[in-house]
Every structure is written in structure tokens, then in C-alpha cells.
Amino acid sequence: MLIHPHTPSRALAVLSLVVAPLFAAGPAGAQTLCTEPIVPACVDFDLTYDNEGSIQRCEEDLKKFGDQLDEYVACLDRRVDELETLRGETRERFTCRSEGRENCP
């Protein structure tokens, strides 16, 4: 049996893969979801270099890719900050509990 690529079950499965990480929260709260940009395919297509118009469109794609890379790196920096905060909070909670204190974070 062939399943059409746009069937509701496939769409639901894809949606769950995209949305589920957005709701995955650890002790530190919501997590940053960073998406690595995709290198423009035009760079490796021979036809790209056949005319000035194609070269210009690829150049524009490369500019967008560079901007997306900058956003990705900034997102990863935020994620590292979140993880460092989580490390500190986890250590604080452990220390508090291991010392027998009450009302630990």
C-alpha cells in the first residue's frame, strides 16, 4: 500500500518531530532550539555558473546563508549559557539536599 506524502498521519508525524522539542523543558525551563542552516545547493551545481543571473541568485543565497549562520552561532551561544545555568542550578540543588537542608531549589 502506498501512502501519499501529504496524508494526515505523515503530516502529524512530521509536526510532532518539529513541535515536540519546543515543549521539552528541563529544570531550567524552556530550552533554546537551534537549527543549523543548509548550505545553498547552487554552489555545487554546474548550471549555476552558466550565466550571470544564476550566479547573482546564488550570491544572494550565500548572503542569506551567512546571515543564518550568524543567527545559528548566536543561538548556540544562548544554548551554552542555558546549559551553564543548568549546571549551576543542579549543583546548588545537589549540595543543598546532600547537606540535609530543607526547601532546596
Image: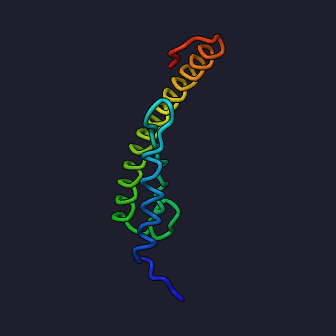
Q: Tell me which residue sits at (38%, 43%) in the image.
A: 67
The residue closer to the viewer here, 52 or 100, is 100
Count all numbered tags in the image, as a single digit.
0
Percent position of residue 30, x then y: 43, 37
Residue shown at 40% from the left, 76% from the top: 6
Outermost residue, right side: 98
Query: Relative to residue 100, is residue 58 depicted above or below?
Result: below
Relative image position of residue 81 (x, y in whole percent): 49, 26
Residue ID at (41%, 69%)? 11
Residue at point 33%, 64% (across, down): 53
Place residue 61 in its image quadrant: bottom left
| Front one among 95 and 15 | 95
Front residue of 70 and 48: 70
Which quarter of the rendered picture does the N terminus lie within? bottom right
Q: Residue furthest bottom?
A: 1
| Colour mapping used in the image | rainbow
**Vertical order, 103 against 40 (above or below):** above
Location of residue 82 with respect to 54 vertically, above or below? above
Image position, residue 46 (x, y; %): 51, 68
Instruction: Locate residue 44 relative to residue 58 in the image: left or right.
Output: right
Which one is in front, 99 or 22?
Answer: 99
Q: Quadrant of residue 4?
A: bottom left
x%, y% of residue 82?
A: 49, 29
